[in-house]
Image (cartoon, coloured by chain):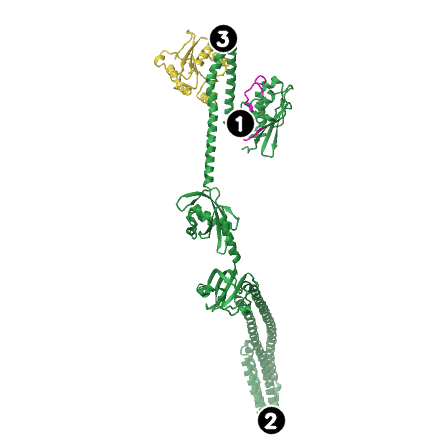
Amino acid sequence: MMESIGMGAAAIEVLLVEDSPGDVRLTREAFKDAKVHINLHVASDGAEAMAFLGREGKHANAPRPDLILLDLNLPKKDGREVLAEIKENPALKCIPVVILTTSASEADIQGSYQHHANCYITKPVDLEGFLKVVRSIDSFWLSVVKLPSVPCS
Amino acid sequence: MKARSLLNRRVQLAFGAAILASLVVGAISYRSMVASTESNRWVRHTHEVLENLQYSLGAMQSIESSYRGFALTGEESYLESYRAGIRSEEQGEVTVRNLTIDNPKQQILIPTLEKLAAQKIQFGERVIGLRRTTGLEAAANAIRSGDDEQIMGEFQGVVRQMQDQELQLLIRRDADVKRRLGQTKTVVILGTVLGLVIAVAAGWSVQGENSRRGLAEEALRDSEEKYRLLLDGVQDYAIFMLDQQGRVASWNAGAERIKGYRADEILGQDFSRFYLQNDIDQGKPEAELQIAAASGRCQVEHWRVRKDGSRFWANVVITAVRNSSGNLLGFSEISRDISERKETEAKYRGLLEAAPDAMVVVNQDGEIVLLNLQAEKQFGYRRDELVGQKVKDIIPEGFAERLIADGTRSALEAPAQQMRAGIELYGLRKDGSDFPIEIMLSPLESSGGILVTAAIRDISVRKAAEKHLAEMVRELKRSNDELGQFAYVASHDLQEPLRMVASYTQLLAKRYKGRLDSDADEFIAYAVDGSNRMQGLIQDLLAYSRAGATVKVLHEISSENALKAALTNLRATIGESGAVVTHDVLPAVTTDDTQLAQLFQNLVGNAIKYRSAEVPQVHVSATKNGGKEWIFSVRDNGLGIDPQYFERIFIIFQRLHGRKDFEGTGIGLAICKKILERLGGRIWVESQPKMGSTFYFSLPERDGK
């Protein structure tokens, strides 16, 4: 499943790897109020995320994302594997990866940072909390932080 | 024997020394006597020389006066004495020369003496010749010429010189004799004294030895007497001698007491009268003597008969008595009435039969001596099949040996002991099957050495029960673990759909509040509230299932710091309520600091939450309880708790207040209880409604390393 919102020259490409359509919709709702123009691409499992990043098959024309929001518990290919593959790939490793998951386990947090996740966020259980988190991702990663404009070496 | 030879040796030595001393004294005396005789001979010799010199001088004077007489009177008789004088003089000279042959000084003078004597005689001849040829006048003139006087003077001078020399020799020899005599005297006196001392010492030693020997002989006689008295005094044993034919030769008091005969009645009688008639008929008395004679000793236990015809069970030892060359002199018999012991044994058998366990009595060779009915049943053998068999037939090999060793050793140590507690032992039935057993050993001293009584309990039932219990415990633990896992998984997986429900009802409320009708708003509000509470419960359930699940390695930490961490987390609550939280100095404890902070947070949080109208005051302190644990207390001035709820408040999701009064799911104290269970502590409360509450919890004192 692939969706995009808002097409524009100055748009920022965000890849959301998330199997829950409810969370996808909530994320989308939250990004609606974003200060920048965001093209939100969604991959519903790890395998599709890697296909998107590798521009395979129907993703042949996929853009290179500026930010990846990655859930850990995914069908087919686990989020932990996806993180490891991204960070081991010289062409992809500079893309900031934000782990956005329901897991608050210490092992997952440790493991993610060891695999060079750029930040780890536990999904808040209430709506306000969730909206706040997505907005803060928008304001920090997409507005404050300067992201590399070309693929790293 | 040894003492005697030692004595002989000492006496020999003493006498030897005395004889040696005498010999030395004798030798010295003899040598001294020889020397003395020699000296005396020399003195006599000197006197002889002196005498002969004097004699020669006398002879010379006699010659002179003879030829002078002849010159004056011309009487021939003077010539006779003249000739006699010459012979004497010559004889004297020869004697002197011979006597002084060893004295060079004198020998030198002898030629001078001879020359002078010759001159004198020559002068005398001339005077005699002149008297005969020319008469008195010429002869007188010749004499008056002085030659005569001169020769005589010289002669006398030489004689005196020789005499002086001899006198000097005499003085020296005399002194020598005296010195030797003195020495001899000293040596003889000393030697005699020494000999006497040795003789006295030896005599004293012999005397002492003899007196000692006398004492020893007396002691021996004394001890023989005592021994006889001892034998006589023995009451419990009949001790008596038999001659070669088995006639009684001696009798002690014990024999009289046990057998009932007086010594004068029984001495000389055949000992077979002590036996039962039946035994006599079978020739037992003779047979036993033969065994004793052949093997030195015959030990038996059988019935004996007293004088009055009554019988008693006796333990009898008959020993052959032989002299040093091995000839049989007779026998000694020591017997004892052991009827009582036989009775005790009978009682023991009774006890053995009554015992609920299998009882097996084993001797030191590992042979089964006795067993009870239970043993027959347990092992499936008949009694006669087991008696005399090795115990290892029914108890695994290796353990049986231990049984003997342990049992006999314990005879000296403990009265009874369990064999190798903690190790599983198995008994072997006749049909080859085995069963678990427990063995208790106790030693039993008997006439045949130490016996070991083994009480063998079949513990199959107990083992099965233990095994069942262990299985139950394992099952319970597994189901408990499963439940914990279930609580975690359930609450975790429930959370996802719940989050959807909550999020979208909230989104619904946010977007459409006031845009639908009032019923819709109310329904949405309940849905939001319900989902929120559901989320709270699920989160608490998760927290509860996680509590204490991963106990860290325990370290010594400051409990005061843990409290401070808790108070930091409660900052907002404390600020809002204006609570005053105080604490004593809190100890260092070996525990999990995160969990301790959680405990403080829950208890102080509750203390503030369930406050009365007053400003909340919370005090935390700790006391040591008998060195084994620390007891922490959190005291408040809050609502207090009715004692009937003291148990209930620690159960998960149990609440004492409505949601309208206080928020919460009723998880806090349940979590505290769970944490303390994991840390090895306890939690309890003391309170009265409206009087405030004090929550206590204990933490075990651990080695901090």
Residue B123 magenta: no
Q: How many marks?
A: 3
**CB of mark 3 within 8 Å of CB of mark 1?**
no
Q: Is residue A101 visible?
A: no
Q: Could you tell me residue B473's position as x and y percent?
A: 48, 33
Amino acid of disc 2: Glu
Q: Are marks 3 and 1 on the same chain?
A: yes
Q: CA distance from mark 2 to mark 1?
A: 181 Å
Q: Could you tell me residue B49's position as x and y percent?
A: 58, 81
Q: Secondary structure at mark 2?
A: loop
> Height in image: B79 above or below B235?
below
Q: Give the mark, 3 or 1, whose residue is nearer the N terminus.
A: 3
Q: Could you tell me residue B24's position as x and y percent?
A: 55, 72
In the rendering, which numbered label is found on residue B674?
A: 1
* Chain that is coloured yellow in the picture: A
In the rendering, which numbered label is found on residue B279?
A: none
In the rendering, which numbered label is found on residue B511?
A: 3
Q: Could you tell me residue A41's position as x and y percent?
A: 41, 12
Q: Is residue B185 visible?
A: yes
Q: Tell me what hue chain B is rendered in.
A: green
**CB of mark 2 within 8 Å of CB of mark 3?**
no
Amino acid of disc 1: Lys
**CB of mark 2 within 8 Å of CB of mark 1?**
no
Q: Chain of mark 2?
A: B
Q: Which residue range is magenta in the image?
A: B657-683
Q: Nearer the viewer, residue B699 or A153?
A: B699
